[in-house]
Image: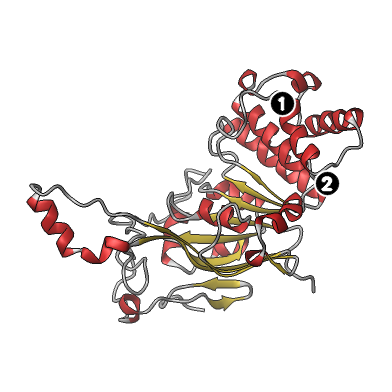
Amino acid sequence: MAEPLIRISDLRKHFPVKVRWPAANDKPLAKRIAQSIKRRNATVKAVDGVSFDIMPGETLGLVGESGCGKSTLGRTLLRLLDPTSGRIEFEGQDLTTLSQSELRPLRRNMQIIFQDPYASLNPRMTVGATVAEPIEIFSLAKNTTEKRHRVTELLKTVGLPEDAHSRYPHEFSGGQRQRIGIARALAVKPKFIVCDEPISALDVSIQAQIVNLLQDLQQGAELTYLFISHDLQVVRHICDRVAVMYLGKVVEIADFQSLYNSPRHPYTKALLSAVPLPDPSVKRERVLLTGDVPSPIDPPTGCAFHPRCQVTNKPAACFHQVPKLRKLGVAHQAACHVAQT
């Protein structure tokens, strides 16, 4: 059996929070802070004990509400953010023990496509210079002619005209800019790409084009993706397996058919119930979540989802014991005390 390309174990990324002390004459605020003095040196637990594998050639979808830690996890996985603790293995090598200089040659194999195609490109650089930059950094072309040929090839691969080479990002639409970002990521022939919500800022018609492009590129270049999104329909179309995040933790992970046909975690059931159905005659029970997402600074005790959970007669473990991912079927895991096998 093939070894995982990516393996992360108990990965955590916490951000320290500085509490602003109130003015001396603001007595009500001073009283509230005095009552919650424990938050003085608090941390935001953006990623809190995540573990999973990604196999070569696989697309793993990562879904969840905004603010649940998806993008932070993707960036920490590439060491764009240093993890607080845990282990990140790429082809069996632990990345958390490497310095930035030791990481540099490995970065050729790990790339990212950013969410915002408007902010992720340098407006002062031509498209040709943008795509050529990683080729120059890793010395992948012998001379200027070979470099230009490689850039032209990449632009053609992602569906951009040859004259894009000398033009600037502001001359292109959002979908075309995202194609430029994809060409830049492909320039160094990586093995693994984090797709950080690459279509969320695009029109629906353009989204389909970018998703199809990513699939075609994966088949042609044997790429492995971590596809971060909040669009469950797109994830179902492109991903082999899906991991669901809630408040910094993965609460369920399974192949897409098992997850969509038989979700086990109450949070996953609520997310899937909100996905529109193409056939209006088909009815599905809508699961409405009450309340707001708890603060990652001070999450609830036990299961972080229990204040919003729709399950009645919850056992005491839900309130006092953090659930761990456990096997509930073939390649299906969920972190829930009440989920049945």
Q: What residue is disc 1 on?
A: 127
Point out which mark residue 191 bears.
none
The correct choice, above or below, for 272 with respect to 97 in the image is above
Residue at figure coordinates x 56%, y 78% from the top left:
327
Residue 307 relative to residue 218: left or right: left
Residue type, numbered disc 1: Val
Counting from the top left corner in percent of width and height, residue 166 is at 75, 19
Quadrant showing the N terminus: bottom right
Mark 1 residue element? helix
The correct choice, above or below, for 57 with respect to 174 in the image is below
Counting from the top left corner in percent of width and height, residue 213 is at 72, 39
Q: What residue is disc 2 on?
A: 220
Residue type, numbered disc 2: Gly
Nearest to viewer (mark 2 / mark 1): 1
**Closer to us: 127 or 81:** 81
Counting from the top left corner in percent of width and height, residue 61 is at 60, 55
